Image (cartoon, rainbow, N blue to C red):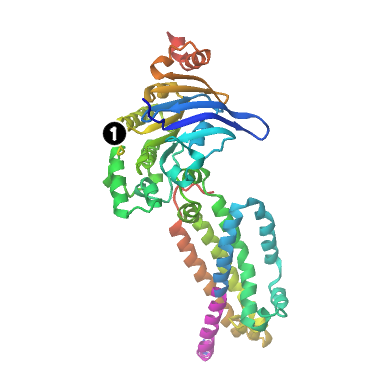
């Protein structure tokens, strides 16, 4: 496996002007076609790390490589268009129809209207929304789960092979969340247009979600990485930080057993 | 009644002419004011630190009594040479504030998450402005335009004091000759113009509002 990782963090630092470190010497590889979950509590730096990839957040030291090249040597606009971005609040454009929301990246790339329409409809069906019923609807007419489906479709519409997902299902109820996790899993397992599976960097504080969706689970604490394990080894890891996290999550079941 | 309709008949051509003149003065002023204010409002939304001083200056313009404003402009080169120029420049000064303020507020108020995504998906700053910020701020901008237009229709009546014409002509003549019919011949069409502008722009504003845009 000498393939270039889709994303590579090399000794990444981010220091606030007051000297506090938000990211502290992070080195991490995200292999092409895999899903890596960044797990950690609020304020651990996992979102900062995620946003460093598409330069939505700056770094003060080290380097980030996307598809083998430093992001600082790449054209910023092209880099961002090539990376899907899904966040908890969805961030759909309230004045665009769903079709236009999904086809947004194609639209700003100047693709022909007919091609955008076709691709948007295809994506809508892929995320389980009937194109004939939903294409002309506006975001405020949707439920939270439906909005997140649209967010997912938008992130993939332009053939992006890297997805950045920041607590994508964090605002959904547990059942809808499970449903959306299946949609995402289905999408990442599907062979992508480029012939590979998309690479997903997923920020979550939900251990179960991380284990369900990711091949590797990375525990982020105080701006640094305390564990980087295959998902199947995570629960049994002897690393104290991992054990603490696992214990904190399973308290309910343990208390009743 | 018969006397009134006779008066109308007699002055009909003049009423039409002065109404058109009034419309032209106001329309030209609003056009210039919009051309200045929208880019200025966008600039302020990009540089929040400039907002307070610039809005302060524009606000001060608003406080100058209109008659005094026309007087100040009278001795100026170029502007003071023609009455219509004085009137238009003065009206522009009054129309700036509502449009600048609302453009600034409308664009600054666009949901931060939406702007974050607009940037993250790779929109250029021009695309963000044209496809996201301006459409979402448009109801606010139109509300400012509406206030500016109604204000200008009213203030334009005073332009007659410097000989710029418009419906104020009737009002000044009516006041001078203590003839209320003349005052009304100026005031009623001016009021109707203001109402019509208010209604039309209000309708447009309502049509362009975005449900669920999260604007406050």
- Where is residue A196, by image quadrant? top left
> Is residue B11 located in the magenta-colored stretch of the structure?
yes
Tell me: A218 left or right of B29: left
List x then y, in percent, for residue A62: 56, 32
Subunit under mark 1 = A
Residue sitting farthest toward the top: A257
Is A86 a magenta residue? no
The span shown in magenta is B3-27
Residue A211 appears in which quarter of the rendering?
Answer: top left
Q: Residue at x 29, y 32 (%)?
A: A190
- In screen coordinates, is B189 left or right of B64? left
How far across and how far down the image is residue A50, in percent? Answer: 49, 33
Residue shown at 72% from the left, 78% from the top: B71
Q: Examine the residues drawn in magenta and state their main secondary structure.
A: helix
Residue A128 shows in the view: no
Viewer-nearest residue: A217 or A137: A217
Q: Position of residue A136 (x, y in %)?
A: 33, 50
Observer-nearest residue: B153 or B54? Answer: B54
Above or below A209: residue A109: below
Q: Which residue is mark 1?
A: A191
SS at badge 1: loop
- In this view, the residue in front, A88 or A67, is A67
């Amino acid at each position: 496996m000498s393939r270039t990782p889709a994303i590579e963090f090399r000794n990444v630092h981010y220091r606030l002007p007051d000297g506090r470190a938000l990211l502290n010497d992070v080195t991490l590889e995200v292999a092409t076609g895999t899903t890596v979950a960044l797990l950690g509590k609020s304020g651990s730096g996992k979102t900062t790390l995620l946003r460093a990839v598409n330069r939505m957040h700056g770094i003060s030291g080290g380097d980030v490589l996307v598809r083998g090249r430093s992001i600082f040597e790449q054209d910023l606009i092209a880099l961002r268009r090539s990376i899907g971005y899904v966040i908890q609040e969805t961030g759909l454009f309230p004045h665009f129809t769903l079709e236009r929301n999904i086809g947004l990246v194609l639209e700003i790339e100047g693709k022909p209207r007919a091609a955008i329409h076709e691709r948007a409809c295809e994506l809508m069906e892929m995320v389980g929304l009937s194109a004939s019923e939903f294409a002309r609807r506006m975001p405020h007419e949707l439920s939270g789960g439906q909005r997140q489906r649209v967010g997912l479709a938008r992130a993939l519409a332009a053939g992006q092979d890297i997805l950045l997902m920041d607590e994508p299902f964090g605002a959904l109820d547990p059942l809808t969340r499970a449903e959306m996790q299946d949609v995402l899993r289905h999408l990442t397992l599907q062979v992508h247009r480029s012939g590979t599976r998309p690479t997903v960097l997923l920020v979550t504080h939900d251990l179960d979600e991380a284990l369900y969706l990711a091949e590797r689970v990375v525990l982020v604490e105080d701006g640094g990485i305390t564990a980087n394990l295959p998902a199947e080894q995570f629960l049994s890891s002897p690393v104290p930080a991992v054990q603490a996290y696992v214990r904190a999550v399973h308290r309910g079941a343990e208390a009743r057993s | 009644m018969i006397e009134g309709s006779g008066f109308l008949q007699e002055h009909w051509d003049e009423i039409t002419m002065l109404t058109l003149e009034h419309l032209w003065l106001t329309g030209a002023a609003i056009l210039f004011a919009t051309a200045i204010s929208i880019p200025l409002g966008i600039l302020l939304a990009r540089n929040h630190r400039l907002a307070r001083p610039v809005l302060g200056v524009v606000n001060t313009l608003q406080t100058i009594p209109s008659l005094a404003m026309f007087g100040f402009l009278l001795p100026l080169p170029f502007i003071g040479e023609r009455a219509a120029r004085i009137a238009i420049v003065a009206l522009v000064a009054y129309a700036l504030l509502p449009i600048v303020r609302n453009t600034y507020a409308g664009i600054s108020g666009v949901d931060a998450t939406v702007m974050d995504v607009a940037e993250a998906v790779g929109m250029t700053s021009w695309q963000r402005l044209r496809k996201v910020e301006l459409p979402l701020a448009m109801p606010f901008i139109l509300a400012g335009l509406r206030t500016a237009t109604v204000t200008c229709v009213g203030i334009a009546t005073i332009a007659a004091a410097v000989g710029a014409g418009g419906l104020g002509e009737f009002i000044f003549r009516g006041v001078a000759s203590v003839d209320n019919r003349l005052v009304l011949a100026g005031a009623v069409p001016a009021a109707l113009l203001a109402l019509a502008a208010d209604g039309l722009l209000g309708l447009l504003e309502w049509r362009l509002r975005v449900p669920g845009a999260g604007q406050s």
